[in-house]
Image (tube, rainbow, N blue to C red):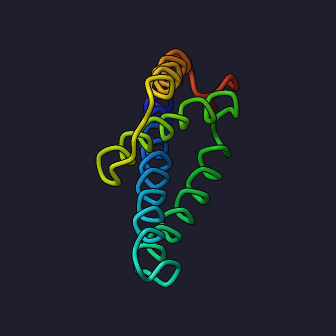
Amino acid sequence: MRVRGVFWKTAVFTAVVVLSNVIGNLCLGLGMKSPAGVLSPWVFGGVALLIVWTLSRMTLLSWADLSFVLPVTALGYPLSAFAGRWFLGETITPERWVGTALIVAGTVLVGLTAPSTKEQS
């Protein structure tokens, strides 16, 4: 039963890390392109979400291996590319899409492994 609880805890915190990173960066992008710039509410929201990202990532690292956390949370990079394309109208070259696909493939491969190599007590 303990392993199942660790799995769900890790899955939830991984989702929080990825989503707070993507949405925080998107908010920063929106804010910095607005007339208010640094004083935009979007920037303040982005900074708040990136604080959540940092704290949740630190928490995730406290019980999962670094070799698991970094690749799995790297899913935020392709999601940020999609967000930039859809919400900010950024142009993404085919080479960047290939790189994004490679990141996703690596994330899937690492996600199939256990989050920690330590025995659960």
Identified at 43% across, 40% down, the residue is 81
Nearest the camera: 57 or 22? Answer: 22
Q: Is residue 40 above or below residue 62?
A: below
Total numbered circles? 0
Nearest the camera: 15 or 118? Answer: 15
Give the residue at the far left of this rendering: 86
Q: Quadrant of residue 31?
A: bottom left
Nearest the camera: 105 or 52? Answer: 105
Q: Return the x and y of residue 88 as percentages of the image width and height.
A: 35, 54
Q: Quadrant of the N terminus?
A: top left
Q: Quadrant of residue 40?
A: bottom left
Q: Return the x and y of residue 72 as percentages of the image width and height.
A: 54, 31
Identified at 42% across, 57% down, the residue is 26
Identified at 48% across, 34% down, the residue is 75
Identified at 65% across, 52% down, the residue is 58
Q: Return the x and y of residue 11 as percentages of the image width and height.
A: 44, 37
Q: Is residue 86 above or below residue 74?
A: below
Q: Return the x and y of residue 4 as percentages of the image width and height.
A: 43, 30
Q: Is residue 61 above or below residue 38?
A: above
Q: Quadrant of the C terminus?
A: top right
Judged left or right of residue 26, residue 117 is: right
